[in-house]
Image: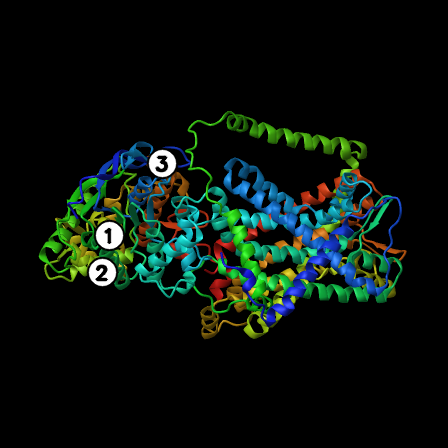
Amino acid sequence: MAAPLLVRPNRWDLLTIPLVLGLFGLLAWGLRQMTVPFEPSGVMRLSLDPWHLPEYAFRTVLRMAGALVMSFLFTFTYGSLAAKSPRAERILVPMLDVLQSVPILGFMAITVTGFMALFPGNLLGVELASMFAIFTSQAWNMAFSFYQSLKTVPRDLTQAAHLFGLSAWQRFWRLEVPFAMPGLVWNTMMSVSGGWFFVVASEAIAVGTTQVQLPGIGSYVAEAIRQQDLGAVGLALVTMLVVILAYDQVFFRPLVAWSRKFKFELIEEEEEPESWMLDWIRRTRLARKGMAVAGRLARRVLLRPPASPRVPSSPGPSWSRTLLRHAFWPLVLGLGVLGAHRFYTFSLAPLGWSEVLVALGQGVLTLLRVVVLIGLACLVWVPIGVFIGLRPRLAVRFQPLAQFLAAFPANLFFPVAVLAIRRFDLSPEVFTAPLMVLGTQWYILFNVIAGASAIPADLKETARSLGVRGILRWKRLLLPALLPYLTTGLINASGGTWNASIVAEVVSWGDDTLVATGLGSYIAIATEGGDIPRVVLGVVVMSLYVVTVERLVWRRLYGLAEARFRLD
Amino acid sequence: MAGLGEHELLRLKAVEKSFRPPSGGVQHVLKDVSFCLREGEIVAILGRSGSGKSTLLRICCGLVTPDGGEVLYRGQAVTGPVTRMAMIFQSFALYPWLTVLGNVELGLEARGIPDEERRRRALATIDLIGLDGFESAYPKELSGGMRQRVGIARALVVEPDLLLMDEAFSGLDVLTAETLKTDLLDLWVERRMPTRGILMVSNNIEEVVWMADRVLVLSGEPARIGAEVPIPLKHPRDWESPAFKALVEEIYQVLTRRVRDTSAQKSPLAMRLPTAPINQMLGLLDAVGQEATGRVDLPVLAEEMGLEVDDLFPILEALELLGFLKVEKGDAEITAQGRAWLDADILERKPLFAEALVRAIPMAAHIRKVLDGRPGNRAHEDRFLAELEKFLSEDEARRVLDAVIEWGRYAEIFAYDDHSGMLSLENPGAQEPPPEETGE
């Protein structure tokens, strides 16, 4: 084995190595802070001193990283199980579909109490609850992407692996994970973008009498709102901006650039994504050597040759398999019935059926807001997106901006809106509504930009040479070509908007609280009052709305768009 | 390559394979396939796409389990992937995230061969196959021919006892394919690889006559070994020699015998129609018609049209079914009807084609009759699919109906809406007119 100690560091190492060591130190400190003792009865307040902000920002990032680790573990297990076992697939995939539509924020009240009970007297319980909230916002689409990749691994590659005698474990790391990598990285990026919103929303939690503020940017903003300190809100905004930019540059850019090598296409691309960070790492000598050694160790573990020669699998099914086969559907059915029964005894029975009607009615109001706002957002952003997308130079510059805007947690802007509504004496029923799409409208924009820039040049030229202009051009060229992209954008935007209604229909500034009637405020108010049966009812009703809209509208639209208008 | 002893490397005894489509029923793919490959032999399996030859290859190495019969490798029953065999894939099947070296090392790595020996063997094979200088390249940086060299190196580095080739050269252009074949044959003839036998699957007649010692022709449905043609020529072989040409001609004759076999089927409605686009039928007929005699030798025709067996035979079969062409003894001859269709102008061709279609293809006549009998002259395709599925697998039924629909639409004996799956007698041009379209 080559002796890594003989490698001399180069100038790129000089910066990298202290940075890496520093990072490890910070990590250890952060983890230590997560597990300090904590009393739920005592109210924990953050200081608004701006000097604390870097520390808070780091804690927020750490929470995000923790959630990401959870998401990956979940993705690898759930995705593999769904892809490998046809029986599990039939239940896991539809379940994922429903989970994607559940308004996560509504669950905070339930999960916080659960996790706090797991770690009594320690902050870790609350930290985990917050991470879990973030996890639920990002894990589903990652798992789905992984599952779909596993289902599409080319047969020849799998057979080559079989013939070379790779074990299932080796196949997983050598073939399946690399094949899934580009899709997984892209979905992770989208997940993290969405996750900032939930970090901010989940750090300051109040359920009934329990009030927690986890040290972080979200809590800092919550405290600033309580103390009506507009300057502090501004500082938090700037910090968040820096954090997101740094996260993008230091973490995701390199990751995306690196994951290109896993792309399963044998054509070289014209434009390779670039990252200064990745270039930097690639230029270091000692640090790279260190990584190579670590990589070799990892490969030892992951690619261990089979300990014993392959044992041919026994022809007959074992008794446990037989049992599973017969018990599977009854088990699933039993769990379903149990869940429905629990829901009935816990929520429905004490609240009564009239409460269901109330929740459904409130749902109509929120649905109305979602529809109107998404429609308005389309009217604004589709023309703008097309304008940008048809101009490649502009698109290259605007696309990252739109993605950044989608990642920026819109809830940080809510206090400003409250002030404006008060100042001009506007109706909160109508004017808090735009807050719901504040963060989600960008999905429409950047999908439209992507769609417009993907229109093949020859189609545009044909339109021009045939004299197709104005409304006809929109009808015959632009809208059909955009539809698959626009639908993707709309699906993302509408899901996010429902979710956002939980934090956007009740907004406050100090003691001044604005409430818009709707299912979102229904859940939010029940959470604040510690009224768990109502929270559960609200969440179930909202899921029902989201799933119904998804099935009736989005899925059909998507099917049509894919079948008819996909350009390839 | 005789003289290496008569050791049997591989023996198949009455191998059977069928697939069970989810709609029920059984589709037999292979039936009663028996053959043997001895040490020092190159055996080629020739057949058309969908004839089950790739499945057969995968049965030989244990990737696919047969439903009946037995596979013996050096006298021992094959029950799982045999790691002493290696395969070269048509699609190359390289791992794009591994470098050339990484791809070549993969099989050694899986066997737990120590780092140093692994590197040494991989580099030696890379040299052998003419890839030196490309060790650190990723597959996407390479041309198709270089990629397949990696595929070959990856297979050879594990020193396989038996080498399998699954249409290994059909993804390459003619020139590249020829170079690769020659290089591989050189290694084989000069015994520079430890491999004791090669089993190849191909749809290219010249290729198998060029490389193999024995050609097994798969034919029939389900497929069985219809003929065995020994190739007694010495390497290197000469494309232009009369002996070579005679062997090519002989195999064409064996294959055209099969064309007529399929036209006699169980139910006339469920006739297994070939998938042949109208324009290709016209093009091929034109090529035959241009000969003064109206008669062409099939190898000549194939070369002239640049078509391989997979593409050529469905077109021949379709033209023959419709009565436009006669195939006999490796020759194709245009009929009077074919001549009339060919000489007609674009509009006149349609009624001629329609006439032939209704006369020759029972399913087409059947669809037309059902539509005529319905009050609204409409019927859903599912009805006809169900009729076909009584005799064919789900996929095959779909394919056959698609073939009928394509021909019927061209002949304008009925119209079809792809979205609703509705067949009707409406004028295809007047379907669902969007109101704004008329004004423009």
Q: Residue B292: x and y, percent?
A: 11, 62
Q: Residue A179: x and y, percent?
A: 49, 53
Q: Quadrant of residue A373?
A: bottom right
Sequence-earlier tag: 2 or 3? 3
What's the residue at 64%, 60% (across, down)? Answer: A443
Within-10-Å neighbours for mark 3: few <14, some 14–19, many 20+: many
SS type, badge 3: loop
Question: Which residue is nearer to you in this view: A411 or B159?
Answer: B159
In this rendering, which labeled residue sits more in front, label 1 or label 2? Answer: 1
Q: Which residue is mark 2?
A: B305
Q: Residue A212: x and y, percent?
A: 83, 49
**Residue B149 seen in render:** yes
Label annotation for residue B309: 1
Q: Quadrant of residue B152?
A: bottom left
Q: Quadrant of residue A403?
A: bottom right
The residue type indicated by label 1 comes to Val
Answer with left or right where residue B229 lies relative to residue A38. left
What's the residue at 56%, 69% (across, down)? Answer: A283
In this rendering, which labeled residue sits more in front, label 3 or label 1? Answer: 3
Q: CA distance from mark 2 to mark 3?
A: 38 Å
Q: Chain of mark 3?
A: B
Answer with left or right where residue A335 lies relative to residue B372. right
The residue type indicated by label 2 comes to Met
Is the residue A188 above or below the residue B255 in the image?
Answer: below
Is the residue A339 above or below the residue A460 in the image?
Answer: above
In this rendering, which labeled residue sits more in front, label 2 or label 3? Answer: 3
Is the residue A176 above or below the residue A536 in the image?
Answer: below
Sequence-earlier tag: 3 or 1? 3
Q: Are marks 1 and 2 on the same chain?
A: yes
Q: Are marks 2 and 3 on the same chain?
A: yes
